[in-house]
Amino acid sequence: MKIESISPLKCRIQLDQAEMAALDIEYDRLDYADRRTRMAILELLSRAQLLTGFDGFGGKLYIEVYPDEAGGCTFCFTVLRTRAVRQGEKRAAGPLPDAPCAPELFGFETIDRLMAAASSLYRRAGHRIYRSALYRWAGRYYLLLVPFRPKDPLLRAILSEYCALTGRRVPALAFLREHGQQLAEEAAVERLAGY
């Protein structure tokens, strides 16, 4: 897979036949109404964002796909210029910064909801999580996530099915760290998804 950021608003991804098979897609069957195609596109956009900083999630997206003679494809993604971009919003190109985003805390009523959320997160967006930890306090479970992208919409969409955002404030985190029971200091999502 070759991922190339052409500009802050354009990205090109070249896939060979084996990579297309791994994503379970074929050029002749690409259809945005098809779930497999949508999942493959989300995966490609997530990898492009992780490796180059290209943000294909921030607005309307124009997608072009060209087959090659060897059975692979080239995907060209263009973020359409919205009013916000035209009025001066700048999107940075290049790799993501080394510094993680602010931690976000999610509270769960039951262990079942926590396990289901961790499994879904790991499968659908594990590559978007920089760090995760798990705490328990007052009969509830709290999952601490440090995403690569601030207020990541995919992470929030997945977690909204299982819980509510508890808080990003440092005092809430400090209180939990001091008074709660730490169940996993690192890689909590990966550990939970493994059960």
Image (tube, rainbow, N blue to C red):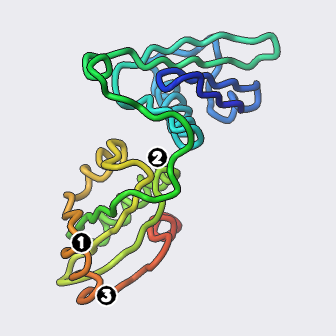
Q: Residue furthest right?
A: 70
Cα distance between the residues tagged 3 and 1: 17 Å
Instruction: Give the mark nearer the N terminus: 3 vs 2.
Output: 2
Q: Decide which of 134, 21 is in the foreground and name it.
A: 134
**For residue 67, what is the image quadrant?**
top right
Inspect the image, locate mark 1, and give the three-letter code of the amino acid beneath it: Val
Alpha-carbon span between mark 1 and mark 2: 28 Å
Left or right of 158: which side holds 27? right
Q: Nearer the viewer, residue 99 or 40?
A: 99
Q: What is the x, y in percent for residue 158?
A: 33, 48
- In percent of width and height, residue 168 lies at 23, 63
Q: Point out the tag, 3 or 1, that comes first from the N-terminus.
A: 1
- Counting the numbered discs, the total is 3
Q: Is residue 7 above or below residue 142?
A: above
The residue at the point 22 percent across, 76 percent down is 140
Image marks 3 and 1: residues in contact by CB distance under 8 Å: no
Q: Position of residue 191 (x, y in %)?
A: 50, 71
Q: Amino acid at mark 3?
A: Gln
Would you identify the image quadrant in which residue 75 lies? top right
Residue named by callout 2: 124
Q: Quadrant of residue 72?
A: top right
Residue at which label 1 appears: 170
Q: Between residue 35 and residue 100, name the one nearer to us.
A: 100
Q: Position of residue 5 (x, y in %)?
A: 59, 27
Which residue position holds label 3?
181
Q: Residue at x 29, y 62 (%)?
A: 104
